[in-house]
Image: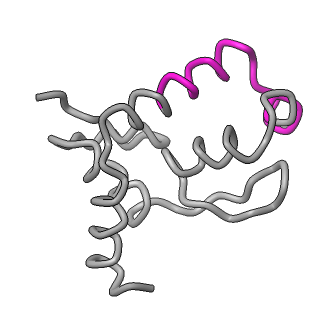
Amino acid sequence: MTDWECGIDSCSETFDDVEEAIVHQTTDHKRRECKVCGSVVPDGYFAIRHAFNEHSRAEYVRAYGASAAEVRQRERVRDAIEDEADLQQVVNRLDEVTGGL
């Protein structure tokens, strides 16, 4: 079983499954304002997903000053999570944790 590490700031908490890692990122870390459009999203996976699903790579690079290597790394993280995660389970778990807020 793969351990999933949070990776936000200096947090290095690990989880047995990716779904719990995403729930942790969403509930235990600050939300971030997208520098492209101003939307406020949970940090971690959801921030990466927002950036690359809602904006072009060029917009991301301009707004964040990211290098091509940094963009590729975030895309690899997103792809690895989406290959393994049951996102409906994440939604259900977040509903439980937040009381459906």
Residue lying farthest top?
69
Q: Which residue does the image show at 34% across and 77% down from the upper left? A: 95
Q: Which residues are magenta?
A: 60-77
Q: Which residue does the image show at 37% across and 53% down from the upper left? A: 87
Q: Which residue does the image show at 30% across and 35% down from the upper left? A: 84
Closest to the observer, 68 or 6: 68
Principal secondary structure, stretch drawn in magenta: helix
Q: Is residue 55 above or below residue 57?
A: below
Q: Quadrant of the C terminus?
A: bottom left
**Rendered location of residue 43, percent (x, y):** 54, 52
Closest to the observer, 74 or 83: 83
Q: Quadrant of the N terminus?
A: top left
Q: Is residue 49 above or below residue 68?
A: below
Could you tell whether 6 is left or right of 45 in the image? left
**Rendered location of residue 65, percent (x, y):** 82, 28
Residue lying farthest left?
1
Q: How many marks?
A: 0
